[in-house]
Amino acid sequence: MTTKRQCGECTACCEGWLRSKVIDMEPGRPCQHCTGQGCAIYPDRPEDPCRTFECGWLKADSPMPEELRPDRCGAIVIFNRYWGRFRIVVAIPAGAEIPPATLEWLQAYARDNGVPLLFDRRLTRDGRYVGIKEFGYGPPAFVEAVRDGIGPQDIFQP
């Protein structure tokens, strides 16, 4: 029997690494309800994004080892997303970029499971986050489309 993982001390999804207009959160600006130890309004948190967010580390069938909890590994991972016709894994840095050891694990997972990986690096100016640079890992068509900034709707039209 597998024990269900708990967030514990991890608050990475609330620290502003994810974006949400609903709770006015973005890189460099955490959720206003994040205490650093949890959520001040957890019982009343909004449906979107809080209740619907599915952290890859917390998933019951997560392939991620214990040490890859987001606050420990520097990345928030989301499985089973789609980018055009590709089912992908998305990795969002919990900081400026995903640490090399975490990125290596994610790339090995992507390669071993035949699932493309979409990840980004945050761009900064004067100590503030001002944008992202996306990267793709996987099939050449996916990597090239991500590199060239071509969205899935542009390359996979019927």
Image: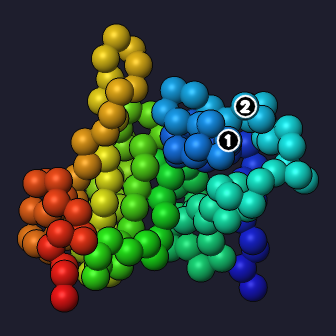
Q: In which quadrant will I find the C terminus?
A: bottom left
Q: Secondary structure at mark 2?
A: loop
- Which residue is under mark 1? 23
Q: Secondary structure at mark 1?
A: loop
- Residue farthest along the bottom direction in this orientation: 158
Check disc 2 and give the amino acid type: Gln
Q: Residue 103 location, x and y as percent?
A: 32, 52
Q: Seen in the image, is 4 located left or right of residue 70? A: right
- Residue farthest along the right direction in this orientation: 43
Q: Residue at x 90, y 53 (%)?
A: 43
* Among the 4 quarters of the image, the one containing residue 37: top right
* Among the 4 quarters of the image, the one containing residue 82: bottom left
Pick the residue in front: 36 or 141.
Answer: 141
- The answer to whether one can see residue 108 in this image is no
Check disc 1 and give the amino acid type: Ile
Is residue 152 positioned above or below 106 on the image?
below
Q: Residue 51 location, x and y as percent?
A: 73, 61
Pick the residue in front: 63 or 125.
Answer: 125
Tag of residue 32:
2
Q: Residue at x 9, y 62 (%)?
A: 144
Tag of residue 54:
none
Task: Check if mark 2's residue and mark 1's residue have beta carbons within 8 Å.
Answer: yes
